[in-house]
Image (cartoon, coloured by chain):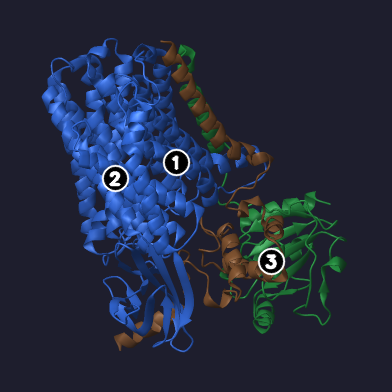
Amino acid sequence: MVPSLGNFSLFLSLLFAISQFIVSRKNKNLKFISISVIGLLISSLISFFLLMYSHVVSDFSVLNVFQNSHTTKPLLYKISGVWGNHEGSMLLWILVLTLFNYFIFKLFNKKNSIFILKTLEVQAFITIGFILFTVLTSNPFERMIPAQANGLGFNPILQDPALAIHPPLLYIGYVGLSAAFSLSVATLSLNNSEKIPWYNYMKPFVVAAWTFLTAGIALGSIWAYYELGWGGWWFWDPVENASFMPWLLGTALLHSLIVVEKRKSLQTWVLLLAILAFLLSVVGTFLVRSGILTSVHTFALDPSRGIYILIFTALIGVYSLTLFGSKSKKYFDNNYFTFFSKEGSILVNNILMIVVCATVFLGTIYPLLVEAFTNSKISVGEPYYNSTVIPIMIPAILIMGVGPMLSWGKENKSKVFKEILPNILLTILMTFFIFLIYKSYSVIGFAGIILAFWIIFNNLLMLIKKNRKYSISMIVAHLGVGLLILGITGSSVWQEEKIIKMKIDEKTKIEKYNIVFDKINEIRGPNYVALQGIFFVYDDKKNIVTKLKPENRFYPIENNFTTEASIHTNIFRDLYIVLGEGNSNDGWVVRIYYNPLVIWIWIGALVIFLGGITSININLKKLKILS
Amino acid sequence: MKKQLLIIPFIIFLFILLTFFYLLAIERNPSELPSNLLDKKIPKFETESLLKNERFISAKEFGKEKILVNFFATWCQPCRTEHTYIKRFSKEKGIRIIGINYKDNPKKAVEWLRKLGNPYSDVPVDKNGRIAIDWGVYGIPETFVINSNGIIKYRHIGPVTKKIYKKINLLISDIE
Amino acid sequence: MIKKKFIIIISICLVHFFLNNVQAVEPDEILKNQKQELRARDISKNIRCMVCQNQSIDESNAPLAKDLRILIREKIKEGKNNDEIYEFLTDRYGDFILLNPPFKLNTLVLWFFPFIFFGIGIFIIFFHNKKSKQN
């Protein structure tokens, strides 16, 4: 009953999307539009919650619930499990799409009616594409009759709070970019959109998208860090790259919008980036769900899904990019700026972000190209990205320090130099200081610390100056990046690792810490049993620092093992312990990691997120004033 | 900025799109792993034999006739399921099969072959897995088709299924 | 009674403990010579685990990964240099086993394009600058 209703509601939402498309194209009747928009939102909400209901009550007659759930799964994961699989995640995509569709609709007023209608038309097309895809290839309401008594369970490493909110945040990101896409296409296709402040409409969507994409990516990395067991948090896995590329273009888009708002320059950049960022999001979806790549993340593989997504991408891509090719010329401006200016630094940043994005894209699809066109197979892994992306990022970060301080149009080089001289000195001083503490002489470490403090001090300087012209959200977000770089450098360059076999009551030492293996407990969780090791950590003054309790869990339903690392965090370092194999006779394999400055990665990401939220608020206020 | 340059994003997009369509069209299997030793001579090895007293020397055995090489072990469940097909190769094609016993207990292996039937003309023992590494083996079972000149013509990863059995059958007839 | 069952289950399970995503170098693999061990780790991080999805043999718990880790350490002790070790592995498993793509004809594009993109980018910047100055 419930699943059939859910399925019906899904079809209904398809109808509403089609009606929105037709009405915004032909009829243009405001009443019908609002019925379509609201109907679309409500029907997709209903189908989403009905799927959630089926999961929560463990209705195994629904194939999706059977394949991904079990009665013993904790409630939180029954809920988040709704979007932890391919079919369910499509419902979440659709829900967020209909929500943003509603936000676009709210922008409607007498002056911009044609423009917003056009935007709604494009957005409707996108929504139809996603709902049709779901209905044709990935319907979560498919039944399994006769229903089994219980389900197959859910991968235990995915049963985690960080991973539960990671997809919704990412989808807000991608859908926000779809709104920017629709606004861009509307701008290009209409003839007098110069009169419409289309960039003012686009900005809040882009800021929201970028902010939540940042949060989503950060949460994915946090999860990887504490779940996967060796202190790594980024692997250049194709699915990670699929979210990173839209983020890079989103960053360029965000900054270009600021320039458009203030100086009307870079409009063609904005129009193009808005199209490309969303196209990349969809291509990313294609790469991940089509089965064309293998990755730790890939969802169930199905070539028909791949074909559909590719055709959809082809339609929106060909249309939008040919439109751009023919219509964007009138958005050129001849406003002069040197490249030692605020616009100049943003333009350089755009180019660098696009170069990094193109590099990551190339690295991701290159193995496919080699396989398709030659008879061999190669891998492109972490070493490739490290050697290409990092060198290109370095100038971008250097520019990021000084760019915000430059004036519009043209800047006096010696004036700026005088302003940032204290920063340069402070940065050098801080770098020496850090090196005194960590006593390590790595070139990458050196570069990373310099860059981090370059950003941090430049932004603190701007903060202290209380100059009205510096946007607080920019300072906060950039500060976050500086902290992020600090964390990344510390944890990558100065990580210490110890792998040994320990018997109970034995002790070992890492850095200044003494670690004693106290005992092994057997514990029981809601859907797992585990062996838990108890380790006491003492500092060099024999004071107890913490008790670490790593676990090896066995989930009987899924027949799967996981390890849960135990981590003690402070602002200087993480102490991270993993319990390996072993027994009471021979002892246990214990892996201990000393990861400096890791928490600054997460703090940095949080600060960036806060900067973004502040900016969303400011931009929403601006939008209200507009209307 | 010239107007013509504005069409460049579209052109790049088209190229990438066509590449993806092509990749989907050729139906590649992303988990299929080619052997780097195809069309190369078999890696030489010398080791003890499970069932015979004399050592197994590959140089003596390969290069005279078509041979099937099958990596197997008693602890490997898929090896058990494919064993009927291995026996069929021996019976129906009359082809010589060499079974390399991978990281196994010799006594158990002897018993396993006694119980399930022994299609192998010889069973060299790969105690520590190094022979397998020399053959570029990922995991057992793996089956190789060698022609009469000692050249590796084909490698299959995983158990031999009906489909693979047919494929290898045809191949054996085709090669020299 | 139930507790006993659990202990048995856990012991049996952990004997067959087989997880692909925990960093996997074991204490008994570690070489005594620190320099050699560091070399082994560096090489391992560049070798793909062929039976996993997107992991190096340094990270993977798969049996093949372990065998290769041990083999690499043996070769280091024998005095082989890094190139020889990589060649040994690629002879048997192809270039696919390298996570750092080799510098060959079929990877020319891969290695050069980022810098070509970068160059084009710089060119665009200068071109824009020149044009702006003219206006």
**Residue A269, percent from left and from top:** 37, 23
Is C47 on the left or on the right of A325, as rendered?
A: right
**In green, which chain?**
B
Of all chains, the one bearing label 1 is A
**Residue contact at pointers 3 and 2, CB within 8 angstroms:** no
Q: Amino acid at mark 2?
A: Leu
Nearer the N terminus, badge 2 or badge 1? 1
Asked if residue B20 is positioned above or below residue A501 in the image, the reply reads above
**In brown, which chain?**
C
State the SS at label 3: helix
Q: Amino acid at mark 1?
A: Met
Q: Colour of chain A?
A: blue
Count of numbered circles on the image: 3
Asked if residue A557 is positioned above or below residue B20 in the image, the reply reads below
Measured in 3D between alpha carbons, the distance from the residue under mark 2 to the one under mark 1, in whole angstroms, is 17 Å
Is A252 on the left or on the right of A501, as rendered?
A: left
Q: Which residue is mark 2?
A: A479
Q: Which residue is rendered at x = 33% and y = 35% of the image?
A: A418
The answer to which image quadrant residue A403 occupies is: top left
The residue lying toward the viewer, choosing from A110 and B6, is B6
Q: Which residue is rendered at x = 29% and y = 47% of the image?
A: A215
**Residue contact at pointers 2 and 1, CB within 8 angstroms:** no
Q: Amino acid at mark 3?
A: Ala
Residue A1 appearing in the image: no
Disc number placed over residue B132 in the picture, else none:
3
